[in-house]
Amino acid sequence: MSIVVQKYGGSSVSDAEAIKRVARRIVETQRAGHSVCVVVSAMGDTTDELMDLAEQVTPAPPARELDMLLTSGERISMALVAMAIAHLGAEARSFTGSQAGVITDDAHGAARIIDVTPGRIKSALGAGHIAIVAGFQGVSQTTKDITTLGRGGSDTTAVALAAALEADVCEIYTDVDGVFTADPRVLPSARKLDVLSMEEMLDLAANGSKILHLRCVEYARRYGIPIHVRSSWSQKAGTWIKDNPYEGEGAVEAPIIAGIAHDRSEAKITIVGVPDRVGVAATIFGAIAESGINIDMIVQNVSAAETAKTDISFTLPQADGARGMQVLQSIKHDVAYEDLRLDDKIGKIALVGAGMKSHPGVSAKFFGALAQAGINIEMISTSEIRVSAVTRAEQLDDAVRAVHTAFGLDSSDEAIVYGGTGR
Ligand code: ASP
Ligand code: MG
């Protein structure tokens, strides 16, 4: 029998009615002859509400206790989904991440999965039961404490279980019909994609697309698990994400552009008047790395010959902005720069497509579209399959619209957003 792993996001299980609807879909899948393992997220905006609650109790909740609190959200969903399935006359058993064998390191709030030992899930499936697993959580191998995988982590739970169970597919159910050429909440003319390569999805997720957790895509690529992103509100086929969809049997030609991602969660730090000498960048980025801050784009030019000084700018998560500034202040003496600036009003747009590799003129068209829309570009970065630019945050939606139109991605049908607040 084939094993299917299905993951239902928060908006798909937002209330009792939604839970009953999802339960029907799960039971139908089992009746169609599959072994079904389901991963659920917390209902609606529960995780945000639990975070708010913790912050009302203390501005700095201990990480271990925050994880205890947040994992309760997924446990509510898993038990309710199991009950709704029982009501339909099928057998379901719910399991916490720990019971499902999701073993992690001990980094509370951002734990990494180091092993999955799904013995209890296999027994449940073997007995003909539907297994329901609480997403986004595991148990630390060393401390045995409950951990969370980071916001949006239920996608990663689903793919990790799909890999451990050797499932045929990991279906991710969400509140839109699949992966779109741009966020349909920003751009209703965005078009649903039928297929996408793992590397395109990785670039979209890394550049702000919230449809899938970045680590879920990394995991799926490593273990060769095909992902089918689709809506839990409709029976339409969604978007298939797999290795090399543009090669071999059933291949379609790689589109020049797959889609556009945007991100408003970053900040930019500029180090002004940096002496142009060997080792300066190593000192700066060494100190930033040591503090555990993840940086994204970096821009530096050769110094103007007369001054022998240059500016270095880089982007980092907004939440790390203040700490990044502190780190740089602490090395001011070593680096001997003139000034530091923090700007958290930036937006990032990224154009992604595997066909870009072999097509000239993509960057020119991208910059042309931004220019015509009157949008100034502050930073640029590229890879083989991506062009991205930093703009003012308030111009970001206009930038997405302009580039989407310039590349002929607009659809005449309006994209449907079935639920969720997009929070
Ligand atoms: N409930 C968690 C969150 O809101 C995990 C998830 O939904 O994937 O981030
Ligand atoms: Mg999600």
Image (cartoon, helix red, strand yellow):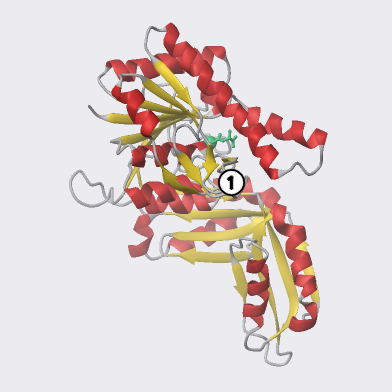
The one of 2 and 205 positioned closer to us in this rendering: 2
Is residue 257 visible in the rendered image? The answer is: no
Say above or below: 299 vs 293: below
- Residue 337's place in the image compared with 9, above or below, is below
Secondary element under disc 1, as helix, strand or loop, is loop
Residue at image point 81% right, 33% down: 56
Residue at the outermost bottom position: 306
- Residue 307, compared with residue 359, is above or below; it is below
Percent across and percent down for residue 3 are 29, 30
Q: Quadrant of the C terminus?
A: top right
Q: Residue 355: percent from the left, percent from the top?
A: 34, 57
Up-down: is 316 above or below 138? below
Answer with left or right where residue 299 lies relative to residue 319.
left
Q: Is residue 263 left or right of residue 311?
A: left
**Amino acid on which the number 1 mark rests in the picture:** Thr
- Label 1 neighbour load within 10 Å: few <14, some 14-19, many 20+: few
**At 60% across and 25% down in the image, what residue appears?**
44
The image quarter in which residue 128 lies: top left
Q: Position of residue 318 (x, y in %)?
A: 70, 54
Quarter of the image with the N terminus is top left
Front residue (pair 137, 221): 137
27 or 349: which is nearer to us? Answer: 27
Whether the residue under disc 1 has CB within 8 Å of ligand 1: no
Left or right: residue 277 compared with residue 170:
right
Which image quarter: residue 177?
Answer: top left
Give me the residue at 75% from left, 41% from top.
Answer: 61
Determine which residue is flagged by label 1: 143
